[in-house]
Image (cartoon, grey):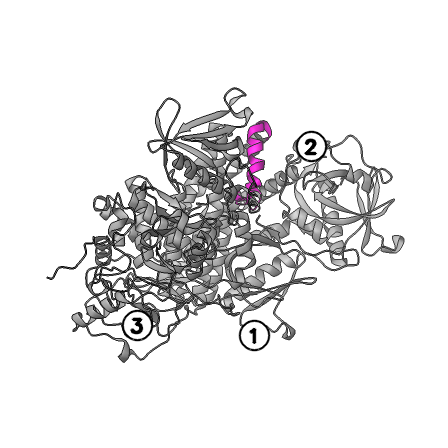
Amino acid sequence: MGDIEGSYRVLQTPGTRLGAQFNAGISTLEPGQSLSGNMIGGSKSHGRGLQIRVEGLDDSQEFFDIDPKAFGQGLLSEVFLRGNLIESDYFGLEFQNMQMNWVWLEATKPVAKQVRRPANTLFRLSVKFFPPDPGQLQEEYTRYLFSLQMKRDLMEGRLICTENTGALLASHLVQSEIGDYDDVADRDFLRMNKLLPYQERVQEKIMELHRRHLGQTPAESDFQILEIARKLEMYGVRFHPAADREGTKINLAVSHMGLQVFQGNTKINTFNWSKIRKLSFKRKRFLIKLHPEVHGPHQDTLEFMMASRDQCKIFWKICVEYHSFFRLFDQPQPKSKAIIFTRGSSFRYSGRTQKQLVEYVRENGAKRTPYQRYVFPYTACCLSFNDSLRAPGSPSSATVSFYPAHISSILPRTELQLQPQPLSTLSRSSAHPQQHHQQQQQQLQSPLQVARPPSPPKEEPVKAASPSHYAFQGAPSNQAAGHCSPLFVCVESVTSQSQPSKNVSFGTFVPLLPQRYPTDKAYFIAKEILTTERTYLKDLEVITVWFRSAVIKENAMPEGLMTLLFSNIDPIYEFHRGFLKELDQRLALWEGRSNAHAKGDYQRIGDVMMRNMCALKEFTSYLQKHDEVLTELEKATKRLKKLETVYKEFELQKVCYLPLNTFLLKPIQRLMHYKLILERLCKHYSPTHRDHDDCKEALKEVAEIATQLQSSLIRLENFQKLTELQRDLIGIENLTAPGREFIREGCLYKLTKKGLQQRMFFLFSDMLLYTSKGVTATNQFKVHGQLPLHGMIVEESENEWSVPHCFTIYSAQRTIVVAASSKVEMGKWIEDLNIAIDMAKKSQEKSSIFLGSSDEVSLEQESEDDMNSSRTSLDKQTHHRANTTMHVCWHRNTSVSMSDHSLAVENQLSGYLLRKFKNSNGWQKLWVVFTNFCLFFYKTHQDDFPLASLPLLGYTVSTPEESDSIHKEYVFKLQFKSHVYFFRAESEYTFERWMEVIKSAASTTGRMSLLIPKGGPMEINGN
């Protein structure tokens, strides 16, 4: 073997580099040198530009030509543009400085001034800002890159966790890469890819956990990785060594919430941004100035000693950027430079804040490039690798993208246009390994000339095919490496002659013939069970995860109540977690998404339902205790000020999208859902169908439990409504008195001296309340009058007052005249009032409870001025949600009865829909939940809180007209005045179901009267 002139060291491969303790990321090769022999004497000039090497989150490397005087922002923009990163502000480029520390590339400084030898330095694409909740990441592609960052942090020992947690994270990574569990494929993959430093010890545990992820898509795996990681103490933590005043060695870190102090790997203190007045550094000293109320006036400055001034400044800059990104609404303005003297640093964060980024992505959602990944069976089919990176014939990542293919975390999603080719031209013989090796060397020697990606194409108004729309068939295990399965078009190299790659040549699978979902109605009924179960489990997590966390953090709930609440709901939650996993696996087999090679007839759901409905009977005792739980929780919130505060503040969080006690009723209400869905399934099946008997048995079991709990549910729903009104009404106490039943709430116009004034009326079994929405600091309503039903008379009086839809209410103390928004509304109020009056007459016990103020409000006293001055009881006032039923009734001039509420509970529905606005071109895929007369919109079903909500009261639902120019199947139209939305379902069954449940909500009231004031509907943003 001949000697090569000039000495050089062979660079470590990206995989080896990941585990290396010390690597400056600086090549010892001179410009122009290459690892390939015939490149050594090659030319080193690329014009007068700098060639920068960037490593992606998947360890692939790309080269970028920039101007020698280019600023950091220029390089960042090139990287983000080529990778088509929409949520780019979460990311940055880091490199190792002369002290071997990873530092961030600054956008506002020239690259050449930050890096000593830019052409020989390795830049690394990394996550810079770690949001507390992965649900804040709008794009699936961004979540994929974040999961790769977690993978890198695990391997580098930054994301410290227990071995069990590490094994769980690794199992999701394996599921994301190779799909469903297969013993041989798992062992091969884990042998070739190191995910954990201690992988050998926990390999069996990883495989055991991977077996449980059957049917989980890559996107779901990514989300699970982030969900697990974000709960770890070391999530997103980057240590900066320091010492305190006593000389004790500590580590400083910065996060979304503030500064953290660690001793070893244990967090010992956190300084929230709200407590910090100023951050500064002086030589090696890093100073934190706190507000006086935090530590008193005599200890308001904390001092930490760092290794050098440079390290102090690096950490200070990171703190400035984190504070700006997470805490500011708008991008900070750059500091103007002094003409003569300078004082302090002019450094400012130069990107978008998180708030600006979220708004930008939402506004540009329709312009986004669709990104989906396919997971294929783990085989060595049609893959070619760089010999320096992998052994010949070794398997690669089996993750392949759709529209367009994803090659690396830097290459754009829009670069590849894969065209079907004849299969005969695509299969490659494995009989010429030497020739293939030479081709690889030629590819490695070619200079990189990757074209800039085109702008994202406009999204066509059609639904992008999801991975499960295709039949994925694994190549036989004995198939020779290098041959394609006949079910796929195999694209040998993703880069053309004009775009050679300098590192890896990938083989990409493209499904040849699409295959739709099963079309049987039974499948879509089964899918409704799955989609509603997902929403139900998320609803349970509001109590079991989020509310538990809130009360524990503030130590606000007595131990006895904690035990009563969570010992009842935790077992139910755990049961439904297992049930959901079983449903997901069965639907995966039904759709053909799973590659588990399971044998048997899985196109049915009755056996799963029967097994779980029988098991659910064991939880009847827990469900029967919900009455006690709800009552005790209400008593405790009245008794304990701290718990009441935590309760009210929690209800304002985005995750609590309904009144909190509504979530406690979900387990009993879910039984009614199972009963109704199983009834539809039994009705669909013929008696001779193989699934009919199991469904019938499951229906029998759940109907038995539902019958036992029916009366309890009616009582609890009434109690829940009364407690909700108690919180939202000012000027009334003891609304939850025993024996009182809620009947109807809604908007009527009351005749006063100033004319017709809008009022909110509440009808109970013993009284009628009317309220107004005053100009106060809250969304609450103030009670203006209370009329007992005993002795009340109601009469129509349109002719007497010449007001449309007008009727008069005569009570013992007072007479009031009110008008409804329509004839139908008037009829409903009069009917319910007369029924309530008759019930009150028959009641043996006349209510002796006196509520609210000491005397009634007369017609002369009540006016808009009184309404505007209703600022009493401010101690009760907190900000309330504006999408509760009473607020929607107020804005839509309508009403809702208790029977409407009960019907809405039965008609809950969730699933993916495509949404289109009246004047937009594209369709947006959203996870939609219908509950409480409202549509809630989520990006995916994994999201913890809705992006927006659309109250349906007052809307009409219909199919599109010819003038709407909608030429798609299964589309329905929602309209309120000039506000129009179109939604597209995936099948005839789901289309009919959405139409049915929306009609049940939208048709509960009459519409469109002259009394309705002008104004549009509310679409309340999640923010």
In 3D space, how far apart are the residues under numbered discs 1 and 2 (Cα atoms)?
A: 54 Å
Front in this rendered view, residue 239 or 598:
239
Magenta stretch?
Answer: 638-664
Magenta: main secondary structure equals helix
Residue 508 lies, in percent from the top left, at 32, 68
* Callout 1 touching callout 2 (CB < 8 Å): no
The residue at which mark 3 appears reads as: 490
Quadrant of residue 183 in the image?
bottom left
Residue 668 lies, in percent from the top left, at 50, 46
Q: Is residue 867 left or right of residue 598?
A: right
Please identify the residue farthest to the left as the structure is shown: 1
Question: Closer to the observer: label 1 or label 3?
Answer: 3
The residue at which mark 1 appears reads as: 967
Q: Is residue 646 left or right of residue 418?
A: right
Please identify the residue farthest to the front as the structure is shown: 340
The residue at which mark 2 appears reads as: 874
Residue 653 lies within the magenta run: yes
Q: Is residue 689 left or right of residue 338?
A: left
Please, what is the three-letter code of the amino acid marked with disc 3?
Cys
In 3D space, how far apart are the residues under numbered discs 1 and 3 (Cα atoms)?
A: 34 Å
